[in-house]
Amino acid sequence: MSSAAACIFCKIIKGEIPSFKLFESDKVFAFLDIGPLSRGHALVIPKFHGEKLTDIPDDHLLEILPVAKNIAKASGAVDFNILQNNGTIAHQVVNHVHFHMIPKPNEQEGLI
Ligand code: 5GP
Ligand code: ZN
């Protein structure tokens, strides 16, 4: 497993790398994606460092979907995707579990 010390998302949780924070609790952190696929593209992550979903204890995952749901509601998005990639072949780039919440803009709004 990748190390927490070198992990950019662990550094974001600790405030060592700046982020636009949307939510924080004892187990979950959420912030805007630096390379958004649409306006409001957010990342929801467990504070527990693990590379893949299978590395994260259940109790650390329990809050994730309610937070993603609330951020989706707060974004005002009517349609949206929740995505979660595991491993290089599955397009995971950052090796700390993260759930994307990607609003789907309507045609008038455009992408960004
Ligand atoms: P993945 O392909 O691993 O599922 O997605 C990683 C996501 O993390 C990408 O959408 C990328 O834009 C985002 N990301 C990478 N580095 C940073 C960063 O330093 N800050 C923020 N806010 N997002 C990041
Ligand atoms: Zn990490």
Image (cartoon, rainbow, N blue to C red):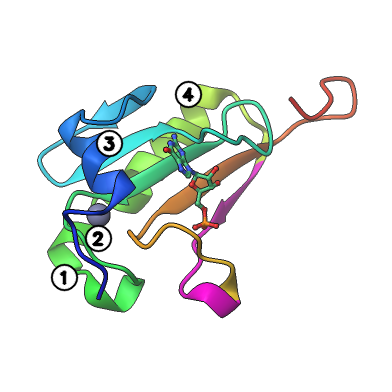
The amino acid type found where label 4 is placed reads: Ala
- The residues tagged by marks 2 and 3 sit, at their Cα atoms, a distance apart of 18 Å
- Residue placed under numbered mark 1 in the picture: 57
Q: Position of residue 92 (x, y in %)?
A: 51, 65
Tell me where residue 26 sits by quadrant: top left
| Ligand 2 within 8 Å, label 2 CB | no
Question: Is the CB of mark 4 within 8 Å of ligand 1?
Answer: no
| Disc 3: which residue | 12
Q: Quadrant of the N terminus?
A: bottom left
Residue pointed to by mark 4: 74
Does dot 1 land on a helix, a strand or a loop?
A: loop
**Element assignment for label 3:** helix
Q: At 48% from the left edge and 24% from the top edge, which residue is drawn?
A: 74
Any magenta on residue 110? no
Q: Which amino acid type is marked by label 1?
A: Pro
**Residues at marks 3 and 1 touching, judged by CB atoms closer than 8 Å:** no
The residue singled out by tag 2 in the image is 61
Q: Earlier in the sequence, mark 2 or mark 3?
A: 3
> Is there CB contact under 8 Å for labels 1 and 2?
yes
Relative to 81, does residue 35 appear above or below in the rendering? above
Q: Residues within 10 Å of mark 3 (few under 14, many from 20)?
A: some
Image-quadrant location for residue 15: top left
Residue drawn at x 34%, y 71% is 53
- The residue most toward the front is 6
Does the beta carbon at disc 3 come under 8 Å from ligand 1?
yes
Provide the residue span drawn in magenta. 80-89
Q: CA distance from mark 3 to mark 4?
A: 22 Å
In the rendered image, residue 88 lying in the magenta stretch gets the answer: yes
- Mark 3–mark 1 distance (CA, rounded to whole Å): 21 Å
> Horizontally, is 57 left or right of 80 in the view?
left
Camera-nearest residue between 58 and 2: 2
Circles 4 and 2: CB distance less than 8 Å? no
